[in-house]
Amino acid sequence: MEAKRFTPAQRQALTALLDDPSPAVRAALLDEFARHGRESVDLLRELAHRPNRMLAPHAARFLRELNLPDPVGEFRGFIRSLNYELETGALLLSRTVNPDLDVGACCTQLDALAVRCRELIAEPASAREKCRVLNRVLFHEYGLHGNADNYTDPLNSYLDQVLARRKGIPVSLSIIYLLVAERIGLQLEAVALPGHFMVGCYEERVPFFIDPFNAGVFLSAGEVFMLLRQNCGSASLADLAPTPVREVLCRCCRNLANHYSAAHEPGHARLFAGFAAEFESTHARHAQP
């Protein structure tokens, strides 16, 4: 059964008791925090990072004593690790708002999509032929599609939700495309265009690009340039370069910050803006000679 959320009055009362030295009060607080699980983690983490020097150490101590999962802390640890792997990062990102996410179920769904692709691929097959099979499985059989009707819905950015609802935005659909391609041994690259996101294939003599938001349509470099000039007014070869995992996940965080802001959820907006800033600052520190 899902734990009830704290009311504003409960949050205020718990905060006021946080530094109470009485063992009986501390025991009662621990019991209350344990019953509320994730909600307690959110409250205590918020208090632990406030500038209030009196309350912050007490909040941090309760977090340690509860030993509850801290998905936000785990994702921050991933950012600071510099050991970026797309699937791990995307799942950790989803867990920041859904700590009960069934990671195994998500991986099993991706595995099943890859198995279906392998069933349909007649080897030897070119990279383009394999992408055609990917398009058939992902967009026609499985029904993945771009959520143009509700583009700014934050759920469009979470891997588990995109798989469950079968709709997303360009970057999340591209992530699924890349993860299934990797499972069938096809080396594709993320391509973070200004204002859009695609997948690039550089294995053939002439590179081509796949637009997962538009049912996997194939585009040449010239066609991508044409789209960029129409939408942004300019284009350069650098726009077509592969994008590192760090920037893919950072872009997801920026999108979520913007989408939560549009949804009038400032707490979540600040959280994801903070993740994006941490990606950037971590990279800046370690990129220096």
Image (cartoon, rainbow, N blue to C red):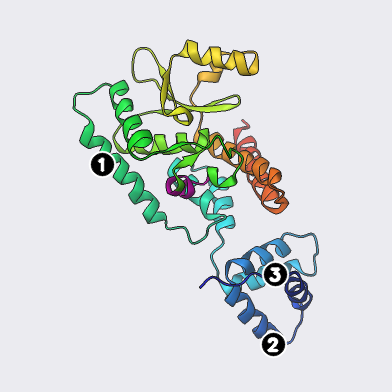
**In this figure, which residue is indicated by the disc labeled 2?**
23
Using the numbered discs, state the Cα–Cα distance from disc 3 to disc 1 in whole angstroms.
47 Å
| Of 185 and 167, the residue lying toward us | 167
Please state which amino acid type lies under the numbered disc 1. Answer: Val
Q: Is residue 30 above or below residue 92?
A: below
Percent x, y for residue 110?
35, 45
| Nearer the camera: disc 3 or disc 1 | 1
* Badge 2 element: helix
At horizontal 58% and vertical 17% (from top left) the residue drawn is 228
Using the numbered discs, state the Cα–Cα distance from disc 2 to disc 3 in whole angstroms.
16 Å
The residue sitting at the bottom extreme is 24
Q: Residues within 10 Å of mark 3 (few under 14, many from 20)?
A: many
**In this figure, which residue is indicated by the disc labeled 1?**
115
Please state which amino acid type lies under the numbered disc 2. Answer: Pro
Span colored in magenta: 157-164
Q: Is residue 52 above or below residue 143?
A: below
Q: Residues within 10 Å of mark 2 (few under 14, many from 20)?
A: few
Can see residue 277?
no
Using the numbered discs, state the Cα–Cα distance from disc 2 to disc 1 in whole angstroms.
57 Å
Is 268 on the left or on the right of 252, as rendered? right
Check residue 59 in the rendering and tell me which mark sits there, or answer none: 3
At horizontal 57% and vertical 72% (from top left) the residue drawn is 3
